[in-house]
Image (cartoon, rainbow, N blue to C red):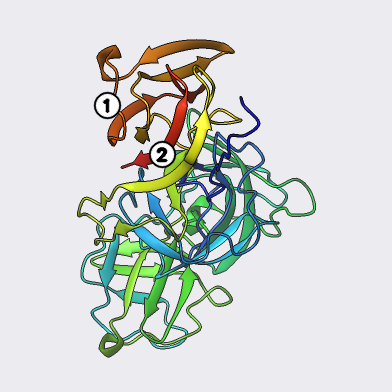
Amino acid sequence: MSDNVDTQKSNLRPFTRRGRATDDPIVPDGTTVVSLWDPAVPEGLNEADDYWNDGQILILTGEMAEQQREVTDFVQATGTLTVAPRFVNPVATLLTVNSPAGDLVIDVADATGFTAGSLLTTDAPLGDLIIDVVDASIFRVGNAVIWENTPAAEMVVITNVDTILNQLTIAAPGIVLAAGYLVANGAVISMQSDAYIWDDAGAEAVTILGIAANQLTIAPPGIIAALGYNLVDNAAISRSPAILDDVEFTLMPPSTVMINQQAGVPIHVSSLIEERGAVFNTVVGAAADFFAADLIPTNTPTTFRIAFSCNAAGVLNVIRTEAGVPVTEHLNANAALVADCLYEFNVTVRAGQTINLQHSVGGTILSCIVVEIYG
């Protein structure tokens, strides 16, 4: 490329991060998202603290698909995003009776969709690390509560779920069962904090121990609703909004414009445009690259829109490179563009490709602007 070419190349933030969420990334109250993974960024979200503040995160799959929230804080060291308002599990229902502090039975409008753990099928003696249950499919690795109606209860850590044998492996010695739990005493195990109760004044995670006639029994004293929840404050309870592994997401920085709609209504994403390169009133030789470095797309597949004018008639060519191999593509059906006239072209680029531009004759590039369009 000629030394006298003044090249401008944008250094704007990317349109989006698109990838998967892993390791139950949403905390029970639905306000914090962690462990986001983007296949294009193996080390995780590596932008500086607060980079994503005022941006948007949209869940694409799973039980909370199409829920979009504003990012209010980003901590790079932990990859943690705080959102508002909270994500809400679609399995939710209003309370029908006020729930005072310490209440263990929650009256609800509809208990459909809630789960209350599984009965044990064999006794779990003191120190037992393998728990036999009726149905292991409702469990995942994480904290759980085991109890019986004597009453006795304690927290355990599930380290493995075997859905074939319907067995749960709990944590190694040091975090073992402190008491024995008997089938004759109605021994049950549930995921800890598998539900979330809230109203306009407060919120907290709870553990559901039983379901009957639109009533949810929550964990015994020590793991109870510490606050009161009132109908006048729109009290409700839902399953926890923890997203399981491999849920796809889109994370958009503040420059992204989206139309936010309620969950259950399709989200419309408006077109996003960012400059990728520009040349203005600059002499360029015949068949010389316009840009010192090839233009690399942020999102793929994507569209590069080229606005071009030159004081000399000639053919505008795209130099497309993939795996180190360049090919030349003629725009305008290989017909010369009229001098001093403005033209626009759209060029689609896929992952692993870059582009540059050349003109078939030397002349002054009056203006050349390349933008990337997504959406």
Q: Residues within 10 Å of mark 1 (few under 14, many from 20)?
A: some
Kind of residue sitting beneath label 2: Leu
Q: Residues within 10 Å of mark 2 (few under 14, many from 20)?
A: some
Image location of residue 353, percent across then percent down = 49, 22
Q: Is residue 203 something one can see in this rendering?
A: yes
Q: Is residue 173 above or below residue 6?
A: below
Q: Are marks 1 and 2 in contact (CB under 8 Å)?
A: no
Q: Mark 1 or mark 2: name the one nearer the start of the chain.
A: 1
Residue 51 position by quadrant:
bottom right
Q: Is residue 135 something one can see in this rendering?
A: no
The residue at 26%/90% (across/down) is 232
Kind of residue sitting beneath label 1: Val
Question: Which label sits on residue 250?
Answer: none
The residue at 24%/57% (across/down) is 112
Of the 4 image quadrants, the one containing the N terminus is top right
Is 29 on the left or on the right of 3, as rendered? left
Of the 4 image quadrants, the one containing the C terminus is top left
Q: Mark 1 highlights which residue?
A: 338
Q: Mark 2 highlights which residue?
A: 366
